Image (cartoon, rainbow, N blue to C red):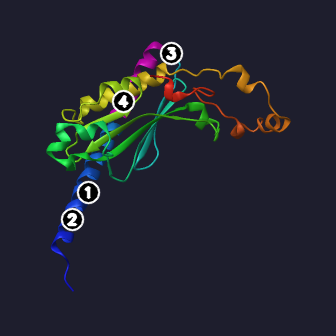
Amino acid sequence: MELKESLSELVFNKGELKQRVYNSTKESFELFRQIAKELLTIFQEKNKEGNHGIRFEYADRGDFEFEIRFAGDLLLFAMHTNVFEFSRNHEVMKSQYIREDPNRSYCGVIHIYNFLADSFLYQRDNDLGYLIGRVFINADKHYFIEGKRELGMLYNNFNTSLIDNNSVQSIVESAIEYTTNFDLLSPPYDEIKVVSVGEMRNNFDKKSLVTAKRLGFRFQADTD
């Protein structure tokens, strides 16, 4: 039994490429973890100096997740273990950077979610969080971000942007800035003025409550 050489090359070449992308993404994720810890330490020191009484906490959630909590908010950083490619219609695919080498379009992904810290503290399982940004990283550690406001507008030069200490610090700081400015708003009155007896009875169980920063609003339109 013989194996076609073209098939062998395809499997090994694609497999090695994806392994390189995974390794680059995992190394970048560990850098995000390190920088987040260092920033939280600085915040904690300033918090003590100014006697502000604000909680700043870091917590690992396994090999591919960690969280930081500050001033009532929680940022969850999560690395996906698979490798992705941009769709043919994505703006990135039209760039000279990708046309020169299509393998550059294969990326790992780090997601950045924003939740209310109380949602986890009080185990309110029905509360909502928001994906405020996702960082795409290729085998050469070039990165591209899709996201809201500070993140989405500042980090979209895939051909020149490289993951390093300074870039990761800037991304984490921008995520904290966006989260701090993304306030909790009450939902429109007409959407919550009628409730059933069952809903009120169930609402005494905190897990049945639903709280989110834009409950009753269309988050997609929030930053357009």
**Residue depth check, mark 2 versus mark 3: number of the one nearer the observer:** 2
Q: Residue at x 37, y 23 (%)?
A: 150
**Residue depth check, mark 4 versus mark 3: number of the one nearer the observer:** 4
Q: Which SS class for mark 1?
A: helix
Dot 1 crowding, Cα within 10 Å, few <14, some 14–19, many 20+: some
Relative height, residue 42 to residue 128 (above, below): above
CB-based contact (under 8 Å), mark 4 and mark 1: no
Name which residue type carries label 1. Gln
Q: Is residue 82 left or right of residue 101?
A: right
**Residue position marked by numbered label 4 in the rendering:** 172
**Residue depth check, mark 2 versus mark 4: number of the one nearer the observer:** 2
Residue 70 seen in this snapshot = no
Dot 2 crowding, Cα within 10 Å, few <14, some 14–19, many 20+: few
Q: Earlier in the sequence, mark 2 or mark 1?
A: 2
Q: Which SS class for mark 4?
A: helix
**Residue position marked by numbered label 2 in the rendering:** 10
Give the x, y percent position of residue 19: 26, 57
Q: Residue at x 69, y 40 (%)?
A: 207
**Residue depth check, mark 1 versus mark 3: number of the one nearer the observer:** 1
Residue 54 seen in this snapshot = yes
What span is colored magenta in the figure? 35-51
**Residue position marked by numbered label 3 in the rendering:** 52
Relative height, residue 103 to residue 223 (above, below): below
